[in-house]
Image (tube, rainbow, N blue to C red):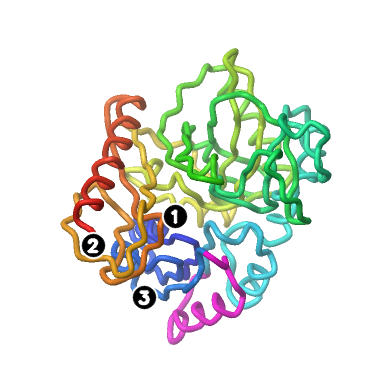
Amino acid sequence: MLIAAASGRALAASARRGGYVPLVADFFGDQDTIAAAQAHVRLCDGLERGMRSAGVLDALERLATHQELAGIVCGTGFEDRPEVLGNIARRWKLLGNPPDVIVRAKDPLVLSKLCRDNGIAHPDISLSPPSDPINWLRKRKGGAGGQHIRAAVDDIGGRTFYYQRRVAGAPTSALFLADGNRALVLGFSAQWSSPAPQQPFRYGGAVQPASLAHAAAEAMIETVQKLAARLSLVGLNSADFLIDDRGGIQFLEINPRPGATLDIFEPSEDSLFAMHIAACEGILPAKAPRFEQARASAIVYAERDVAAFPALDWPPWAADRPTVGIHVARRDPLCTVLACAASAAKAQELAQRRVAMILAATNVGLP
């Protein structure tokens, strides 16, 4: 199975668990991805330039040579590159949402109209700079990971951006499987940011289960089911919400691909990757998997530029460990930390403590 994503490690590991042989192209080529993949090609300059058609197709052709392929699964990195995804789909069997579905799901005006037509609470959207920018955010069309979100008062304009009214609430996400008509929510996660200069909403991590009132959970499930049917979504997707102090929900956006919470929702007796493939073929499980412990994952961002990353003695709860000798730029993702605990609060606290431990160790151990 071909896998293409900004980071392919979690998909590759889940594919292995599901009985597939993963052939991976991603931006990082970290130690864990290389260990999970049967073969790997690094997409150089991916963090700076994103998915470029020639580079991605060349990498996938190299991986596919002399292989008997079941198809390709694409993760994060293609939301703003539907033409690249289209070129991939013309060459291999795409197991996931096709380009036209992703275009509709990431079009702010299409999504806003769908919400109005289906009675879904959704912040106001504008393509033009608002007259009261302090109450608005500027987002990049097709953006992912939170790095692209700015306060509208810091606006630099541009046709690739749109504006969304600020809404108060706790960031919460629903991971779900869809078969083109129906949807099954697998679970809810609470998310937090890791702010950086000019990146106040940079993704920090997620923990499951999210603490939700029954009414809020039911409203989120209903929203997911409506949008999944209207957009004809397939496979693994997620939906982002804000939940206010009274339990009211505001839907924010759809992420129409497997994403950042794979680690914390991987079942002990199954494979999310295999479940994704089955859903793309029209088969949903009878019920969502159960989890005995709360789980959290968090991104560690480099605090300094490292020309050639050295060999380190990594703890077992660290993933996406940089390959020895690779260049890691300041503020780039350095690794992921994972944590399990009896409660979501304890799992999140442990994950954040482990982020601090990695930063302390690397600040001492790096040249």
Give the number of callouts.
3
Q: Which residues make up the magenta segment?
A: 48-71
Q: Nearer the viewer, mark 1 or mark 3?
A: 3
Which residue is under mark 2? 367
In space, the residues marked 3 and 2 are separated at their CA atoms by: 31 Å
Determine crowd level at label 3: few under 14, some 14-19, many 20+ residues with C-alpha closer than 10 A: some
In space, the residues marked 1 and 3 are separated at their CA atoms by: 18 Å
In space, the residues marked 1 and 2 are separated at their CA atoms by: 38 Å
Task: Name the amino acid, label 1.
Answer: Phe
The quarter in which the N terminus is drawn is bottom left
Which residue is under mark 3? 39
Q: Earlier in the sequence, mark 1 or mark 3?
A: 3
Point out residue 90 in the picture as x, y percentages from the top left corner: 66, 75
Point out residue 136 in the picture as x, y percentages from the top left corner: 72, 34
The quarter in which the C terminus is drawn is bottom left
**Which label sits on residue 273?**
1
- Helix, strand or loop status at disc 3: strand
